[in-house]
Image (cartoon, rainbow, N blue to C red):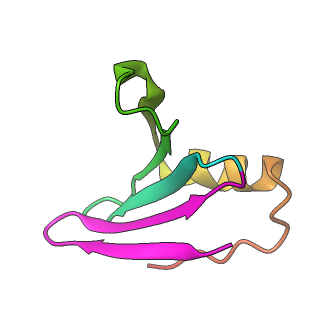
């Protein structure tokens, strides 16, 4: 599995991965306020609902990481 990291000038960083069934999921981390956006691309060019996002605060992102089994979460400034 490859992790794709893309700088977003003036915004932050986007990290994406592709699942075995071709779906893309990732996180956009905003530099200004530490906010995270969980993004999901179902891989359909014809279905506008295939792409969605969920904005999370830093605290919510850490809680989600714990739910996903990330026991050692390192916060960065």
**Magenta stretch encompasses residue 2:** yes
Question: Measured along the vertical axis of the image, is residue 70 above or below residue 1?
Answer: above
- Count of numbered badges drawn on the protein: 0
Q: Position of residue 54 (x, y in %)?
A: 46, 35
**Which is more toward the observer, 10 or 23?**
23
Q: Residue at x 69, y 72 (%)?
A: 1
Residue lying at 72% horizontally and 71% vertically, measured from the top left = 73
Residue 69 percent coordinates (x, y): 86, 57
Residue 44 image offset from top left, x and y in percent: 44, 32
Q: Nearer the viewer, residue 25 or 68?
A: 25
Q: Is residue 37 visible?
A: yes
Query: To which quarter of the image does residue 45 belong?
Result: top left
- Magenta stretch in the rendered image: 1-20
Q: Is residue 14 magenta?
A: yes
Q: Relative to residue 13, is residue 17 drawn left or right?
A: right
Q: Nearer the viewer, residue 52 or 68?
A: 52
Q: Is residue 62 left or right of residue 28?
A: right
Question: Above or below — where is 71 with respect to 21?
Answer: below
- Asked if residue 74 lies left or right of residue 50, the reply is right
Residue 2 placement, left or right of 38: right
Q: Examine the rendered structure and indicate whether residue 38 appears above or below residue 66.
A: above
Instruction: Name the residue: 59% across, 45% down.
Output: 60
Taking depth in this image into account, of 47 and 34 the one nearest to the observer is: 47
Q: Position of residue 74 (x, y in %)?
A: 66, 77
- The kind of secondary structure the magenta stretch mainly shows is strand
Q: Quadrant of the C terminus?
A: bottom left
Residue 31 visible in the snapshot: no
Q: Residue at x 43, y 31 (%)?
A: 52
Whether 37 is drawn above or below 51: the answer is: below
């Amino acid at each position: 599995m490859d992790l794709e990291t893309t700088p977003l000038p003036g915004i932050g960083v986007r990290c994406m991965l592709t699942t075995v069934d071709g779906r893309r999921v990732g996180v956009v981390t905003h530099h200004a306020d530490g906010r995270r956006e969980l993004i999901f691309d179902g891989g359909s060019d014809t279905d506008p609902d295939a792409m969605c996002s969920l904005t999370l605060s830093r605290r919510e992102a850490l809680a989600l990481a714990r739910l996903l089994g990330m026991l050692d979460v390192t916060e960065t400034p």
